[in-house]
Amino acid sequence: MRIPLWTLVAAIAAAAALVSPAATMYKLIGRDGKVTYSEEEPKNFDGKVIRMDVDLNANRSEAPPSVRDTVRDPNFLKQPLEAGARKDREIAALREKLDAARDALRNAKDHPSPAEVERVGTKSGFTREVATPEYEAKLAKLEDDVKKAEEELRRAGGRP
């Protein structure tokens, strides 16, 4: 198989361009002091000509690495979503805990057992219910549970 000559010449020229990353520019300073630049050497120029060999790689900057280059974990983009979902589940669980604590306190206040209240008589013969010390301690603990659940929810960012 024969390769055409023009293909071979083009390949050699392309290889030479890749190997030699330099370019030649000319700085032209006219008699009036005006400065211009040219990629071709001027002919019959009445002024000063300065040849400049420019290294094209000298001032090359690298682009910052992309997210894809810096991230080794293929699930990197899923992690924030999973963290957000995990946070949402945590807040939902804390809200359920707060609701349960409030329900327990409300239920204890609305429906005390006969052992938690005593009947005390008055001078006129009527009786009234008075909480036992154990019942008051139970209510205090339930109120404390509600406050703790509200604080946990607030710290998690779910606002009570």
Image (cartoon, rainbow, N blue to C red):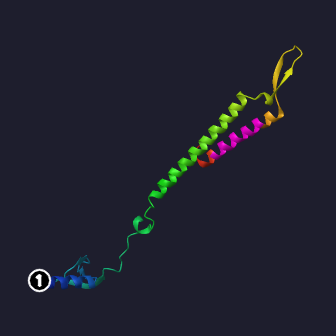
Q: Is 100 rendered above or below residue 71? A: above
Magenta: main secondary structure equals helix
Taking depth in this image into account, of 157 and 114 the one nearest to the observer is 114
Query: Can residue 46 be seen at all in this image of the molecule?
Result: no
Q: Is 141 rendered above or below residue 70? A: above
Q: Give the amino acid type for the residue marked by disc 1 in the picture.
A: Trp
Give the labeled residue for mark 1.
6
Which quadrant, please, contains the C terminus? top right
Taking depth in this image into account, of 39 and 35 the one nearest to the observer is 39
> Horizontal and vertical percent for residue 80?
48, 56
> Horizontal and vertical percent for residue 26?
24, 82
Which span is picked out in magenta? 138-152
> Horizontal and vertical percent for residue 44?
15, 84
The quarter of the displayed image where residue 73 is located: bottom left
Is 36 magenta? The answer is: no
Q: Secondary structure at mark 1?
A: helix
Taking depth in this image into account, of 17 and 119 the one nearest to the observer is 119
Is 140 magenta? The answer is: yes
- Which residue is rendered at x = 82% and y = 21% of the image? 128
> How many marks are shown on the rendered structure?
1
- Which residue is rendered at x = 38% and y = 70% of the image? 63
